Image: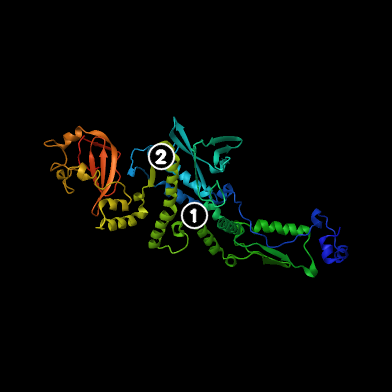
């Protein structure tokens, strides 16, 4: 059967074939055709991308760690009937999710899985129907088993040949919480930011690999050593092998950097690779790093990438990082937890406590000042505007503490307690005697309110003590004091 070359060139190929020397190599009959190849991309498998990204790329690693660590530091506030609940089962369980992890470690694992896989799975361990522990499950080991109606009927966890199934109950209550990022083309699994950054990740890794190979090769690009002998003479096989060995031993590797190459006998060095300048190496690598940061929603300035790295710009970038990357992720996670646990604990809401974020302190201060000076708003409306729930008069100091018993500028002792004008003890009773008979009280209620442009915090304890603090602060969980309402400052 005539070959493609016979059809293209006719008998010319057969005529020339008789004059071509036959090679002893088994591959002598092969013809190599070389052309510019297609780009080789990392597999879109989430596990492989995690190895190439999180384990091998500093930009991806830092993006994931920044988001996960920042999101894990935001406290969770629980509300029932629009009032904050201090003693809620979720808060107790969140403080110690399981025997081996703290709240920060547990949440960090949840957010890391979301960033790398687009999915996070939390197992609920219950006793007598009451949740006792939460555990993170590795997304690469979880597969969803859909039911006849298309909804998940079970979650299958595989380790080697062993498999554990977590069936979804008939009423839809699942022992596994599946958190996922939106995927427009998949009904069950989420879309990871790392998938969107795949092209930039491969470019950045390839640039790093090329740079390392360049350094290992004496910081010189590869080339060809051309021998132009007299009358078309060529090197013998022994001469070729000896020259190749000498090049490898004496002129390759970082330890031979800068060593001059002495050429003689018709040898000439021809560079075959493009220089870093020709490839725009530095700019291409920086652009890839910025694209990776963009996929994760992190401003490049926060990562220290090249740009307008001024102090004011960094402050704005840091606020944008919290507002656009961290807080939305925390809110959607909290809503998923509340929806998952509602059949067990009833309806409740979870909100992030944003007052502890230092990067947003400037915004918070400006907002409080603007709302506090708004004379057309009532105290309740001002509380609602700044995100505080409940009535401004309910439980306020004017109803729980006798304002005639103390003043804010009242004298205090070295422990910060009011000691005169009736604010520190009962009539005719010494403060030291009162404290000697003190009992340990636990926090039962914490409320905040506004009075004009001033913010106040009220801490109510089990023994009846009600403590007022200027500003929005967190109450101490315990208080050592008498079983009376006394305006001690913690």
Q: Residue furthest left?
A: 428
Q: Quadrant of residue 279?
A: bottom right
Q: CA distance from mark 2 to mark 1?
A: 26 Å
Image quadrant where one finds the C terminus: top left
Q: Is residue 415 visible?
A: no
State left or right for residue 474 relative to residue 339: left
Q: Residues within 10 Å of mark 1 (few under 14, many from 20)?
A: many
- Rendered view: 95 above or below 57: above
Q: Which residue is mark 2?
A: 94
Q: Circle 2 sits in a helix, a strand or a loop, which is it?
A: helix
Residue at left offset 57%, top offset 51%: 185
- Rendered view: 430 above or below 72: above
Task: Name the one closer to the observer, 23 or 366.
Answer: 366
How far across and how far down the image is residue 220, in percent? 61, 62
How far across and how far down the image is residue 100, in percent? 45, 36
Q: Residues within 10 Å of mark 2 (few under 14, many from 20)?
A: some
Task: Name the one closer to the observer, 14 or 186.
Answer: 186
Q: Which residue is mark 1?
A: 296
State left or right for residue 178 relative to residue 43: left
Mark 2 / mark 1, whichever is N-terminal: 2
State left or right for residue 76 relative to residue 265: left
């Amino acid at each position: 059967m005539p070959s493609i070359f016979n059809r293209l060139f006719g008998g010319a190929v057969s005529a020339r074939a008789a004059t071509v020397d036959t090679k002893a190599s088994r591959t002598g009959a092969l013809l190599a055709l070389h052309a510019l190849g297609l780009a080789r991309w990392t597999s879109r498998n989430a596990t492989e991308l995690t190895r190439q990204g999180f384990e091998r790329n500093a930009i991806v690693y830092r993006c994931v760690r920044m988001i996960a660590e920042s999101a894990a530091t935001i406290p969770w506030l629980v509300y029932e009937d629009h009032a904050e609940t201090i003693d809620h089962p979720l808060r107790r369980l969140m403080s110690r999710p399981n025997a081996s992890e703290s709240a920060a470690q547990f949440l960090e694992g949840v957010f890391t899985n979301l960033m790398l896989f687009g999915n996070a799975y939390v197992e609920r361990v219950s006793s007598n129907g009451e949740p006792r522990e939460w555990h993170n499950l590795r997304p690469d080991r979880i597969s969803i088993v859909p039911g006849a109606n298309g909804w998940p009927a079970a979650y299958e966890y595989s380790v080697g040949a062993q498999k554990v199934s977590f069936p979804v109950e008939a009423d839809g209550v699942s022992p596994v919480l599946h958190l996922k990022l939106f995927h427009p083309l998949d009904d069950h699994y989420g879309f990871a930011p790392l998938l969107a950054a795949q092209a930039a990740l491969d470019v950045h890794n390839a640039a790093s690999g090329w740079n390392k190979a360049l350094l290992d090769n004496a910081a010189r690009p590869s080339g060809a050593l051309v021998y132009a002998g007299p009358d078309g003479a060529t090197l013998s096989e022994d001469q070729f092998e000896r020259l190749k060995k000498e090049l490898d031993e004496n002129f390759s590797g970082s330890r031979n950097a800068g060593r001059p190459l002495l050429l003689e006998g018709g040898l000439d060095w021809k560079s075959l690779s493009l220089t870093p300048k020709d490839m725009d190496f530095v700019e291409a690598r920086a652009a890839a790093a910025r694209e990776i940061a963009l996929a994760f929603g992190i401003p490049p300035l926060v990562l220290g990438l090249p740009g307008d790295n001024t102090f004011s710009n960094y402050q704005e970038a840091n606020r944008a990082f919290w507002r656009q990357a961290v807080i939305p992720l925390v809110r959607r996670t909290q809503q998923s937890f509340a929806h998952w646990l509602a059949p067990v604990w009833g309806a409740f809401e979870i909100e992030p406590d944003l007052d502890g974020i230092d990067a947003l302190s400037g915004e918070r201060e400006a907002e409080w000042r603007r709302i506090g000076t708004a004379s057309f708003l009532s105290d309740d409306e001002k509380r609602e505007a700044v995100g505080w729930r409940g009535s401004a008069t309910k439980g306020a100091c004017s109803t729980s503490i006798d304002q005639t018993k103390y003043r804010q500028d009242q004298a205090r002792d070295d422990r910060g307690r009011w000691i005169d004008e009736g604010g520190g003890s009962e009539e005719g009773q010494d403060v030291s005697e009162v404290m000697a008979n003190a009992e340990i009280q636990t926090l039962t209620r914490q409320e905040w309110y506004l009075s004009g442009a001033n913010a106040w915090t009220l801490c109510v304890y089990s023994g009846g003590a009600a403590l007022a603090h200027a500003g929005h602060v967190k109450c101490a969980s315990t208080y050592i004091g008498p079983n009376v309402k006394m305006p001690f400052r913690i």
